[in-house]
Image (tube, grey):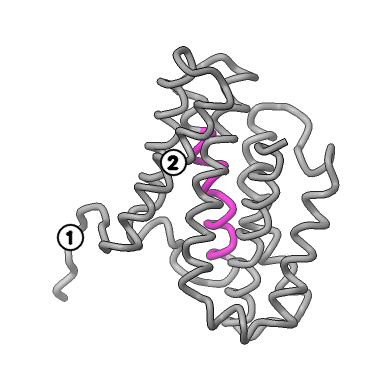
Amino acid sequence: MALHFLDYLGVFVFAITGALVAIRKDMDIFGCVVLALMPAVGGGTVRDLILDVPVFWVVDNRYLFITLAAALLTFVAYRFVLRVGRLILWCDAIGLSVFCALGTAKALEVTGKPVVSVMMGVVTAVAGGIARDVIANDIPLVLHKEVYATAAFAGALAYVFALPVFGTEASIWLAVGVALVGRGLGIGRGWSLPKIRNTE
């Protein structure tokens, strides 16, 4: 039950981040819903299609209703949402952490292959956000901001290594914690991967 709540929470907060981007880009309410859907269900959709399993939101339509509710709430109360922007940043970190852990767990259950599962965990966490940013004509957040995909990668690895020792549920919580700490360091300390500074 707790893991289901985590999954729904991840969808909700990711949907808010998508709707906020739509508002910043001066899109209408339909645009808000579309951009909310991208991070909320996009990564999980890509994962399920690659794994050739039923797409999660087709099986459980509640994910769509949660996304729609988050988009409409953001559209109506966007001034308040913007005022708690720092909180939303941390909510996004929670969504990233939850999705990488649950995505890895699902992929490992389906394939039994740790390497593939880690990749699918990262895809679940970041692919939807990439789609959101591309549609909004932005450079994807994952390519230029603080530690992001790396945090998802660390969380996915943590799940794979912890599973034989701690079992599924405890390993998911551990993976969420590892990813959240990694992303939190990126937010709080501005940590990012090395890059070449363009001086031209």
Q: Which residue is drawn at the image coordinates 65% and 37% (left, top)? A: 3
Write the start and end of the magenta stretch as one range. Answer: 120-134
Q: For mark 1, what is the residue?
A: 196
Quarter location, residue 5 = top right
The type of residue carrying mark 1 is: Ile
Quarter location, residue 18 = bottom right
- Provide the secondary structure element on which disc 2 rests: helix
132 in the magenta segment: yes
Front residue of this view, candidates 53 and 135: 53
Q: For mark 2, what is the residue?
A: 177
Task: Please determine whether, in this image, residue 6 is positioned above or below residue 32.
Answer: above
Main secondary structure of the magenta stretch: helix
Please state the horizontal and vertical placement of residue 173, each as a whole percent of the image. Answer: 51, 34
Please state the horizontal and vertical placement of residue 111, each as a whole percent of the image. Answer: 60, 17
Q: Which residue is drawn at the image coordinates 35% and 62% (left, top)? A: 187
Marks 2/1 in contact by CB < 8 Å: the verdict is no
Front residue of this view, candidates 66 and 133: 66
Whichever of labels 2 and 1 marks the residue nearer the N terminus, that label is 2
